[in-house]
Amino acid sequence: MFLFGPVGPTELILIVLIIIIIFGARRLPELGKSLGEGIKNFKRSIGGKEEKEKETQEDKSKSDSKD
């Protein structure tokens, strides 16, 4: 079972323990929250171009229907 390539379960446990030692158990939820918000903002910025195009198309169709 090579889920993460050559990294096995013991290596993953070791990595998690090192992260807990570096950041501390209290800061891990804050770190996860900020990472999640960063990913959400990144997705929003990538999808923002499509949303802007949809908004401009809707505005054009509204202005055309008013005329």
Image (cartoon, rainbow, N blue to C red):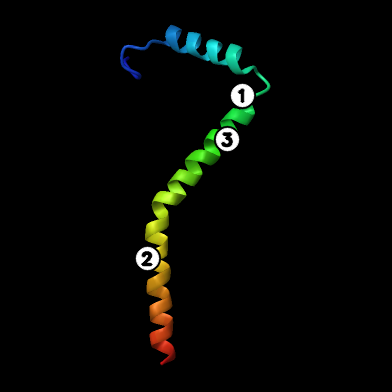
For this orientation, the residue located farthest to the right is 26
Side of 3 relative to 33 (left or right): left
Q: Which residue is pictured at 59% across the width and 34% down the height?
A: 33
Q: Residues within 10 Å of mark 1 (few under 14, many from 20)?
A: some
Quick one: SS at disc 3? helix
Q: Amino acid at mark 2?
A: Glu
**Residue, disc 2:** 53
Q: Amino acid at mark 1?
A: Leu
**Image coordinates for residue 22, horizontal then vertical, percent:** 58, 14
Question: Which label was assigned to residue 34?
Answer: 3
Q: Is residue 65 above or below residue 44?
A: below
Q: Is residue 36 above or below residue 41?
A: above
Q: Residues within 10 Å of mark 2 (few under 14, many from 20)?
A: few
Quarter of the image with the C terminus is: bottom left
Q: Quadrant of residue 62?
A: bottom left
Quick one: SS at disc 1? helix
How far apart marks 3 and 1 lie (CA) works out to 10 Å
**Residue, disc 1:** 28
Which badge, 2 or 3, is on the more N-terminal residue? 3
**Image coordinates for residue 51, horizontal then vertical, percent:** 42, 61
Quarter of the image with the N terminus is: top left
How far apart marks 2 and 1 lie (CA) works out to 38 Å
Which badge, 3 or 1, is on the more N-terminal residue? 1
**Image coordinates for residue 12, horizontal then vertical, percent:** 45, 13
